[in-house]
Image: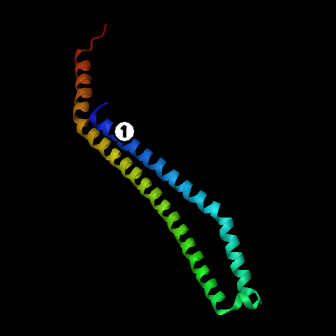
Amino acid sequence: MTPAELERVKAQYASVELADGANLTSMATVGAIRNNSPALETRVANLEQDSLSGDTNLNSEVAVLNKINAAGVLTLRTVQDSNKLLASLLEQQTIISKQQREATANSINADIARRATLAGNLAQVTGSITNSLETFRMP
């Protein structure tokens, strides 16, 4: 394997390792969000039920402030989960961009190599044709 081919293989292997790591992180993030979803739904339902209750103990000034705080915490957790998902998407997109860049660079390098050897290859082909035609004899 030439040094250029070895570098290309190393870069492709690095992309695979990056993708594997990002996939594991993404799956863990989605799993954690799904795992926490029932508890979050329960908390939101409880908060809603308490907010709509006619019970005076649940509608005191302190109780209402506690509900406002609880709603703020739930909002922050939801935003945090959204940011985790966005970070996972960004990782995936970055890896895709790296792979596309490598494919484009490999294509450009292959074209450069083809053009660099074209004249020599063409001369070899036409030189052997000329020689074959000049030395051809009918039996």
Residue 106 sits above or below residue 60 on the image = above
Q: Residue 127 location, x and y as percent? A: 22, 25
Answer with the quarter of the image where residue 13 lies.
top left
Q: Amino acid at mark 1?
A: Val
Residue beneath the point at 54% across and 75% down: 76
- Residue that protrudes farthest toward the top in the picture: 139
Quadrant in which the N terminus appears: top left
Residue 121 sits above or below residue 101 on the image = above
Out of 91 and 55, give the one closest to the viewer.
55
Residue 103 sits above or below residue 49 on the image = above
Q: Residue 72 location, x and y as percent? A: 57, 80
Answer with the quarter of the image where residue 54 lies.
bottom right
Residue matched to label 1 = 9
Color style of the picture: rainbow
| Left/right of residue 16 with respect to residue 73 in the rendered view | left
| Left/right of residue 23 with respect to residue 94 in the rendered view | right
Quadrant in which the C terminus appears: top left
Residue beneath the point at 26% across and 23% down: 129
Out of 69 and 105, give the one closest to the viewer.
69
